[in-house]
Image (cartoon, rainbow, N blue to C red):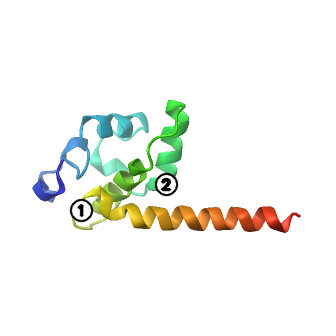
Amino acid sequence: MNPSKIVRENIRKLTDLPNIGKAGAADLELLGIEKPGDLMGQDPYEMYERLCILTGSRHDPCVIDVFISVICFINGDEPKVWWEYTAEHKSVQASKQDIAYQVTQKDK
C-alpha cells in the first residue's frame, strides 16, 4: 500500500503495510510471514537472503529496501516510501563487503 494512505490502526493484512502489494505479500508469505505481527523481530537482510534461496534466484536489491521499510514501520516508525531506505541498505552492504575483503586479505 502507498505509505501516504497508511493508517496504523487499520493494519490487518500484509497488503495493508506500506510498500506491500500482492507480489510483496506473496514474498512475505513464502518466508512464513502470514500477518503483519509476524514481522516483529525479523531481520530484513536475512529475509532477503532467505527469499533468494527459497526462489532460487537473486532478487532486485530494492526488495531489501521494501523489507527494511516494513520492519521499521512494524517497529513504530512512520510509513515511508521504500526508496528512502536505499542509502541505508547500500551502506550496510558496503560494510559487509569491506569486512569480507579484510578477512580474505588477512589469510594471504
Q: Amino acid at mark 2?
A: Tyr
User: Of label 2 and label 1, which has the lower sequence position?
Assistant: 2
Near-viewer residue (33 or 90): 90
Q: Which residue is mark 2?
A: 45
* Horizontal arrangement in the rendering, residue 49 relative to residue 7 (left or right): right
**Element type at marker 2?**
helix
**Looking at the image, is 87 positioned above or below residue 19?**
below
Residue at 48%, 63% (x, y): give it: 90
Residue at 51%, 51% (x, y): give it: 46
Near-viewer residue (20 or 39): 20
Residue 80 is tagged as: 1
Q: Amino acid at mark 1?
A: Lys
* Horizontal arrangement in the rendering, residue 8 relative to residue 90 (left or right): left
Near-viewer residue (75 or 94): 94
* Horizontal arrangement in the rendering, residue 106 relative to residue 6 (left or right): right
Residue at 47%, 47% (x, y): give it: 48
